Image (cartoon, grey):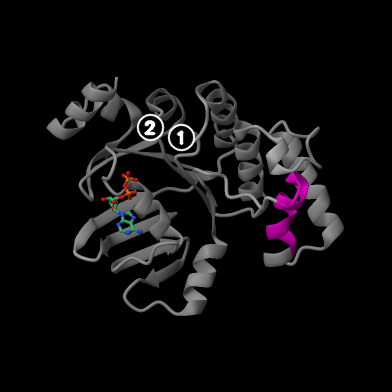
């Protein structure tokens, strides 16, 4: 279980997150929606301390970080429980697909190299890249690179995978293959939090939808609560604009 309590974040004088409370149950797939600039990516990045929250508490399982005074060890432990899939993939350019997936296992988790290789091959096969193990990122399409990013996140066996607009950098014809991979791993009961603009995907795949605007959670619920019968005017307006 993940629990965010009163997460706030300012950049200079701009308060981007105004006290976010959110509970995510184990195995849930959470979609975070909202207009550009509403704080979705910042919230996601706060969960693994890529951004330092100004205040609040983050709990993953039974481990809580008080964001006012976290120790280095707290941040390290928190990061060990999460994996992130980035908009721009963030692969090592000079490493092959296989090496990219192995890296975290060998360097961070100190898994023995042969074991890391075996697990990484398995995961690359799972995302449909069994024939691209030795390809470098420059030899892969955007969709394939993002699938390497997903295999890399899975390899870490995290408590939660955080997806930051995983398809927004892709050409439209490549979006489907990445969403299909995410859809597949969602079935396995891995907890996932996904910032996305793909409304159809969020409706189908998520079991918990969060609508944010101007640094707060305006409304959250089951997909049908939000997409079919939203209660808040701001949610209705947003959905009207984008569908
Ligand atoms: P969203 O993901 O909903 O589009 P973001 O979380 O990316 O929103 O951004 C929320 C607000 O925070 C925006 O106004 C953005 O310009 C600002 N912001 C995000 N990151 C930074 C940063 N590193 N420095 C200053 N302002 C930032």
Q: Residue at x 69, y 35 (%)?
A: 140
Q: Report whether 41 appears left or right of 141.
A: left
- Return the x and y of residue 216 as percentages of the image width and height: 22, 49
Single out the mark in the foreground, 1 or 2: 1
> Was residue 95 drawn as part of the magenta stretch in this picture?
yes
Residue 226 lies in what quarter of the image?
top left
As helix, strand or loop, the secondary structure at mark 1 comes to loop
Residue 213 lies in what quarter of the image?
top left
- Return the x and y of residue 113 as percentages of the image width and height: 83, 60
Say if 95 sits above or below 184 in the image: below
Say if 164 sits above or below 6 in the image: above
Which disc number belongs to residue 197?
2
Q: Residue at x 41, y 63 (%)?
A: 59
Q: In which quarter of the image is the C terminus?
A: top left
Q: What stretch is highlighted in magenta?
A: 94-106
Q: Report whether 49 appears left or right of 188.
A: left
- Return the x and y of residue 23 as percentages of the image width and height: 35, 51
Q: Which residue is drawn at 72% across and 42% down?
A: 123
Q: How far apart are marks 1 and 2 (CA)?
A: 8 Å
Q: Do the residues labelled 1 and 2 touch (CB within 8 Å)?
A: yes
Q: Report whether 21 appears left or right of 103.
A: left
Give the tally of numbered discs: 2
Magenta stretch, main secondary structure class: helix
Which disc number belongs to residue 168?
1
């Amino acid at each position: 279980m993940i629990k965010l309590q009163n997460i706030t974040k300012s950049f200079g004088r701009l308060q981007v997150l105004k006290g976010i409370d959110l509970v995510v149950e184990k195995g849930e797939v959470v979609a975070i929606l909202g207009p550009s600039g509403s704080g979705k990516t910042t919230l996601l990045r706060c969960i693994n301390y890529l951004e330092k929250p100004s205040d609040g508490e983050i709990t993953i399982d039974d481990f809580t970080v008080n964001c006012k005074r976290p120790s280095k060890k707290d941040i390290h432990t928190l990061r060990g429980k999460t994996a992130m899939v980035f908009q721009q993939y963030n692969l090592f350019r000079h490493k092959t697909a296989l090496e990219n997936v192995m890296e975290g296992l060998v360097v961070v988790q100190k898994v023995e190299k042969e074991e890391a290789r075996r697990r990484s091959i398995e995961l690359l096969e799972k995302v449909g890249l069994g024939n691209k193990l030795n390809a470098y990122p420059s030899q892969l399409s955007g969709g394939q690179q993002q699938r390497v990013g997903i295999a890399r996140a899975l390899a870490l066996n995290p408590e939660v995978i955080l997806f930051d607009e995983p398809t927004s950098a892709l050409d439209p014809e490549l979006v489907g293959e990445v969403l299909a991979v995410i859809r597949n791993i969602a079935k396995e009961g891995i907890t996932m939090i996904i910032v996305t603009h793909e409304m159809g995907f969020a409706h189908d795949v998520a079991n918990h939808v969060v609508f944010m605007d101007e640094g707060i959670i305006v409304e959250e619920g089951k997909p049908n609560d939000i997409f079919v019968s939203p209660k808040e005017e701001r949610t209705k307006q947003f959905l009207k604009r984008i569908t």
